[in-house]
Image (cartoon, rainbow, N blue to C red):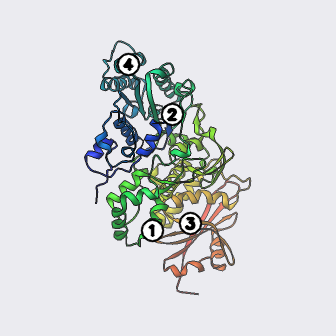
Amino acid sequence: MRPIATDKSDFEELRKAGQIYVDKTAYFHRMITDPSRAYFFCARPRRFGKSLGVTTLKSIFLGHREFFADLAIAKTDYDFAPHTVVHFNWGGVDASSREGFDETFPGAVADALTAAGYAYDCSVPPSLNLSRALTFFKDRDGKGCVILIDEYDDPVAKSLADVPRAEYIRDQLASIYAQFKDSTDKIRFLFITGVSKFTKLSIFSTLSSLNDISFDDEYAAMFGFTEEELDANFDEHLRAHAEKMGLSYDAYRAELKRWYNGYRFAQEDETTVYNPVSIGQTLVNKRRTFRAYWSSTGRASHLMSLLKREEVLAFDYNRLHGVSERAFDVADLKSLDPLGMLYQTGYLTIKSYDCGIYMLGVPDEEVRRDLATLMTGAAANQDMKWAENLGVRLRLHEWEPFFDGLKSLYAAMAYGPTEKRGHESSYARCLAFLLASQGFRFRMEDVQADGRADIVAEHPCGVFIFELKVDESAAAALEQVKAKGYDAPYRAKALPIYAVGLSFDAKTRQLADAAAIAIDVGTG
């Protein structure tokens, strides 16, 4: 089996190592030969192959034809004429303070211009160096250079918890991007990637010819892997993993799709793609269970800060209706739209689009668990380990510490349930986030022959039937579970079944009483 790269984001290094490269060069060829457009912007979540795409473009424009044998672009008439390439990457710039930014940012600019062959002048600002460099390259080469900017928004995004610092950094970056406005005759091609669209950066406000392809149908699958690309590139790895997991190939692929496929990046094209880092890690490790690899690579610190300020349980993250495209643009750093930020950071994706309005939802199981953990921690004002520990207590049927944790969770919800009196469904939403974060498959308002259970959660360690009451006892909740036989549909699963009763006080809006019993599956 050909090796899979999990630690490389440089195209030429990957090709030299003989590792699998999922061919995206048809998309790049379409961009660079577009007769009417030469400046492009594309936003995608982190760890989605943007850096690999940028370095692929760099290799194309450097004229390194030898790395493209058997790829789509090599089958066209593209001539691989060499160009000067200026490759900026702001991922390594220190954004923890103004001083740190001021110290590291000029060096990043200098490194990129020096690598392209320009003699950097440390006595003048980075923006002036860039302006002079664009002129120098045009005079030297007789044609415009290529500008590639990876993680253009990274320093701003890392500073969003400190708005004045973020605004300062944004203004410094804007001085760089402003140089492109009057230099269109000196630039052959411009490609910018990032996670967010900060509309007040001068790259958007002054460069009218910049084409945002983030939602274009023809570039919907430029980043991420389609089903067809998995078949063409990873077949042996997929079959070996299915065998190790003890699943039929069809069952394995269905579960792989549930875990890692669901991202949609276009308005009309309904193609969904797999998260590439998750596929790479899954097929390299080949464990007996699927895991949340993407979330383990790190979370956006600014998103954590934002969620602590929002009523995060007020939304149904599986179906978010009525979202306009304006929500995806970040104009005011002081007033961030939580749904827009969740989309940009990869926790939400497009589910449908009609007449300018989007419906968003969680893309896949991996993200669903991580988002639920984020939401639970934000609601309880606790860290991630707190929610994980609470899930462990439930799986081990350690009821007293589990109930204590639930009480602290509801106590932290200062705004209480959304209904004035407090209905069971209001409290159920919070519990649902906790269950989802810990890998439970659950149904809310599980309709049965003699009523509906509030929440039924399944896990290899057992089936948990939750009944929630307001101003009634936990004992009454347990009695309802037994009387209506909510356990009957699950007896054939040969798993332990537990009834869990939760009682809430309408006045305090807190968990007042809780109890649990094991249901004897051997009785009728």
Task: Give the class, few, some or many, for how many residues have Cα within 10 Å of label 2's Cα (few <14, many ≥20).
Answer: few
Residue 451 appears in the picture as rendered = yes
**Amino acid at the residue labelled 3:** Phe
Mark 3 lies on residue: 442
Percent across and percent down for residue 103 are 36, 23
**Amino acid at the residue labelled 1:** Leu
For the residue labelled by badge 4, is the local secondary structure a helix, a strand or a loop?
helix
Residue 342 appears in the picture as rendered = no
**Amino acid at the residue labelled 4:** Ala
Mark 1 lies on residue: 396
The quadrant the N terminus occupies is bottom left
Disc 1 to disc 4, C-alpha distance: 64 Å
Disc 3 to disc 4, C-alpha distance: 59 Å
Percent across and percent down for residue 498 are 54, 74
* Residues under numbered marks 2 and 4 in contact, where contact means CB atoms less than 8 Å apart: no
The quadrant the C terminus occupies is bottom right
- Ranked by sequence position, the earlier of labels 3 and 4 is 4
Q: Nearer the viewer, residue 222 or 457?
A: 222
| Residue at x 30%, y 17% (from the top left corner) | 119
Rendered image: mark on residue 133? 4
**Going by the image, does 90 lie left or right of 462?**
left
Mark 2 lies on residue: 35
User: Disc 3 or disc 4, which is closer to the eye?
Assistant: 4
Disc 2 to disc 4, C-alpha distance: 26 Å
User: Disc 1 or disc 2, which is closer to the eye?
Assistant: 2
